Amino acid sequence: MPRRKLIKERVPTPERSPEERIRNFEEVNLGYDFELAKREAERCLQCPENYAPCIRGCPVSINIPAFIAKIKEGDIKEALKVIWACNSLPAITGRVCPQEDQCEGVCVMGKVGDPINIGKLERFIADYARQHGMDDELLMEIVPKIEKKDQKVAIIGAGPAGLTCAAELAKMGYKVTIFEALHKPGGVLTYGIPEFRLPKQIIEKEIENVKKLGVKIETNTLVGKTITFDELREGYDAVFIGTGAGTPRFVKWEGVNLNGIYSANEFLTRINLMKAYKFPKYDTPIKVGKRVAVIGGGNTAMDAARSALRLGAEVWILYRRTREEMTARIEEIHHAEEEGVKFMFLVSPKRFIGDEHGNLKAIELKKMELGEPDETGRRRPIPTGETLIMEFDTATIAIGQTPNKTFFRTVPDLKVDSRGRIIVDENLMTSIPGVFAGGDAIRGEATVILAMGDGRKAAKAIHEYLSREA
């Protein structure tokens, strides 16, 4: 049998042109069709399950070679079944997961050419299955086989950690209710990630699939205010806290309270959750000036910059390190550059300058240089002593977020660290027996897939805990 020829270059996915996409919030990447997906799947070397580095590189341990093999066979429903064994939100993770740092980063094909485009193949399976009703068919097969239990679990927060924990527990037969403070579930998926990266209809369908497993979602319910934590503890056998990291981090720069300065959290929430970009159809205006500065170098900064660009502004990313140290996905940086976002590196705000009416008119920036690596492994930025002033009428600060303390303050027995993160043991149990936590609430701001990994791990730990208690 002749050896199969290795195809080193990955099959590209179609995208909207920069000229088209900067005028709207429609999804940029159009994804694979069946033929393109099959061609990309053919490149996979099919590493055995007990060896495949991609499986170990995945925070939720999806059997990646298995679902790619099913694409090659043309059996998309079975491919979805493989993914659903570990991941209930594949249409989401296929779009926003940093695969280049995880499964694709350790792909064996990457040693001789381009790694397999695992993320886009995962997205293809979820999208194709949804478009052809295969996800509903699979749910109709799965749900009747679930052996129901009497024990109840409460989930606080309908973000990626909470949704994943809920789905896993529902598949085990537990009665699960999610309590969400906002009027729509999804957490950061809904309020933080723009439509051009993650369409809201995709989020809604994935959440609908979770609900079909038997999960109930109570929105507009702020635990600690609408309902007390003690009431949850009395009514449920276990609790999972997935409240995320929704408090923006600020530095006490001079002038930071001027009009025209947003946290990225507020800026993106207004646009994504409250549809400010569709004003006046949606009654949530947002003021975006002619020249916008976005301070930061992560995915949130890219999202804010590309959103401001679509609202008609000239946009600058101001980052205190260099391009190589940016934490944003390479794909997002590339898209921002294509669309016309301007980048200035090795600068950091010294002060914000206002006009006589208290509105932002300029930013004084410190010039930086890179020194020795810090605790993150990246070289530490050090001021050179030089400054420059640039005119801006709007600024968005995207330098990170921390867990929200509103809920924690109502639960004095819940131990948190100096940065407000919930302290958990190796099984993700908190200082309160039967109460577990995961995602950004224990990590600080991190990725969607890491939060989902925590949700899955916590579900297993809750199952073991309740099995002992029964």
Image (cartoon, grey):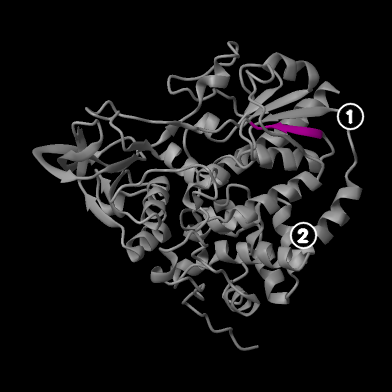
Q: Which amino acid type corresponds to the residue marked 1 in the rendered image?
A: Asp
Magenta span contains residue 123: no
Residue visible at 23% across and 45% down in the picture: 392
- Magenta stretch, main secondary structure, is strand
Q: Nearer the viewer, residue 420 or 2?
A: 420
Label 1 sits on residue = 150
Question: Looking at this view, is 254 or 325 the one in front?
Answer: 254
Q: Position of residue 423 (x, y in %)?
A: 54, 22
Q: Residue furthest bottom?
A: 2
* Callout 2 secondary element: helix
In the picture, the quarter occupied by the N terminus is bottom right
Residue 88 appears in the rendering: no
Residues tagged 2 and 1 counted as in contact (Cβ below 8 A): no
Q: Nearer the viewer, residue 329 or 133?
A: 133
Q: In terms of image quadrants, where is residue 264? A: top left
Extreme-top residue of the structure: 412
As drawn, the label of residue 258 is none
Residue 187 vertical placement versus 60 (above, below): above
Rendered image: mark on residue 135: 2
Residue 221 visible in the snapshot: yes
Q: Residue 348: x percent and y percent?
A: 22, 39
Disc 2 marks a residue whose amino acid type is Asp
Sequence-first tag of 2 and 1: 2
Q: Residues within 10 Å of mark 1 (few under 14, many from 20)?
A: few
Find the magenta span and give its range.
Answer: 175-180
Q: Is residue 110 left or right of residue 140?
A: left
